[in-house]
Amino acid sequence: MRDADVIVVGAGLTGLRAALEMVNAGLSVLVVEQSSGVGGRMRTTAHDGFLLDHGFQVLLAGYPELQALQGLDALRLAPFDSGARIHFNGGFADFFDPRRHPSKIGSLVRSPVLSFTDLPRLFFYASLFPLRHPGPTGESTDASIARFGFSERFASRFLRPFLAAILLDPTLSSDSAAARFYLRVFSGSSAVLPAQGVQALPSLLAQQVGVSHILLNSRVDSVQANEVVLASGEALRCQRVVVCSDAPGAAILGGPEQTMPQRHSRTIYFSADEPPFSEKLVCLNGNGSGALSSVAVPSNVQPSYAPKGKALVSATLLGAHAEAPEDQVRTAALRELTEWFGPSAASWRHLKTFTIPASVPARPRMETGAKVHNRVVYAGDYLSYGSQNGALQAGREAATLVLQGFDR
Ligand SMILES: Cc1cc2nc3c(=O)[nH]c(=O)nc-3n(C[C@H](O)[C@H](O)[C@H](O)COP(=O)(O)OP(=O)(O)OC[C@H]3O[C@@H](n4cnc5c(N)ncnc54)[C@H](O)[C@@H]3O)c2cc1C
């Protein structure tokens, strides 16, 4: 099948969600993807017996858009514990969400990470924040943390490093709406990993769309209201075009936004003979300095991420550390990992590094993720906010726009 009622450009979460909604509504849909596989920013590579997600990434089981999908059981999701292991002053302290881990409540009494006023403040900061289209608050995440009066130790050891890792924003200059949204979702549910890597989610959607409706290795060079032209010169006709690329891709295809700053990230994967810790927690950098943002052991959560007898360690770096030359940064990261986890880290074997310049858009809008521009529908996380939930929402909204105006 080449021509179709609707042509969707891009087989990331946005495009696949849009396609699925439209296929379910009875339209013929063709998804055109430039790369060799589906998933966009959610790809997984099998490497030497390890599963390497292209940048450390988790699914949040509480995302409303994820919960609306069918067939998630096939992903065999396994949860991280709700909390974090924080590195500061040369050692670690664990912080568990008391609502999700009531047995750990005693550990909060003399916690070096929070004071007794922080949890009620966190409740007001996050739990009352709307989940759908809250719009921007107009206040940076950093300013909002200061305004809510969290204790300095909670802000510097947990909240700032946690939000930096989630927003991929070490400066915390992003609008606080995204931070508060994420904290609300985190407070009610777990971060999870699929057994076969994060790409399993877009692969599931692709299966539901029908793989024969997806054209891989086909870059789109230009779009018009009723036509898509491929790099090969082939023109595909349709009644509606939906562009579901990332922000740089949409700008090339005449999208509504021509410039949109992006957050950079870099994840370095190592093979270790032993995991540096056995807990299902992500380690955060609470030191206020250094190259590392977070360190995780995905194989503690999903053993399928590493071959038998090995552990997979991911170290994620943000901002300037994601942009500097890779070999310099890897040396600095390994030195820091040795400080955190002891001399055994020096023997970890480097597997692969993923540097992703356009990881997420720098300005979360927290609004609708799809709009019509020059009679083409554009949708993506760059119009809503950089997350799987934002992308799935954008795809659903794009499908609604098409279906509302579709001339059968
Ligand atoms: C390292 C990293 C960590 C992340 N961590 C999290 C996390 O923990 N939790 C979370 O919720 N979100 C996270 N995200 C964000 C999340 O992955 C994205 O918001 C989401 O996957 C975006 O999906 P999308 O479909 O909108 O865009 P994309 O995934 O970028 O898909 C766009 C697709 O369009 C294709 N395309 C572009 N131009 C063309 C063209 N001209 N012709 C044909 N095809 C084209 C691209 O190849 C791509 O496949 C993370 C992202 C990264 C990179």
Image (tube, helix red, strand yellow):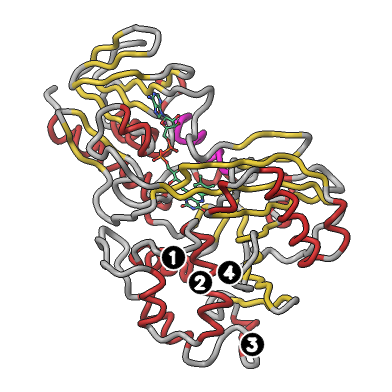
Q: Amino acid at mark 3?
A: Ser
Q: Earlier in the sequence, mark 1 or mark 3?
A: 3
**Foreground label between 2 and 4:** 2
CA separation, marks 1 and 3?
25 Å
CA separation, marks 3 and 2?
17 Å
CA separation, marks 2 and 4?
17 Å
355 left or right of 135? right
Marks 1,3: beta carbons within 8 A: no
Q: Amino acid at mark 4?
A: Ser
Marks 2,1: beta carbons within 8 A: yes
Q: Is mark 1 within 8 Å of ligand 1?
A: no
Q: Determine which residue is flagged by label 1.
A: 172
For residue 344, which quarter of the picture?
bottom right
Category of crowding for the residue at label 2, using alpha-carbon neighbours closer than 10 angstroms: few (below 14), some (14–19), many (at least 20): many
Quadrant observed for ligand 1 in the rendered image: top left
Work out which quarter of the rendered image holds the C terminus and state it. top left
Residue in the foreground of this view, choosing between 215 and 229: 229
Question: Where residue 160 is drawn, which disc sits there?
Answer: 2
Q: Amino acid at mark 1?
A: Leu
Q: Earlier in the sequence, mark 3 or mark 2?
A: 3
CA separation, marks 2 and 1?
8 Å
Tell me the element at label 3. Answer: loop
Tell me the element at label 1. Answer: loop
Q: Determine which residue is flagged by label 3.
A: 111
Category of crowding for the residue at label 1, using alpha-carbon neighbours closer than 10 angstroms: few (below 14), some (14–19), many (at least 20): many
Q: Determine which residue is flagged by label 4.
A: 82
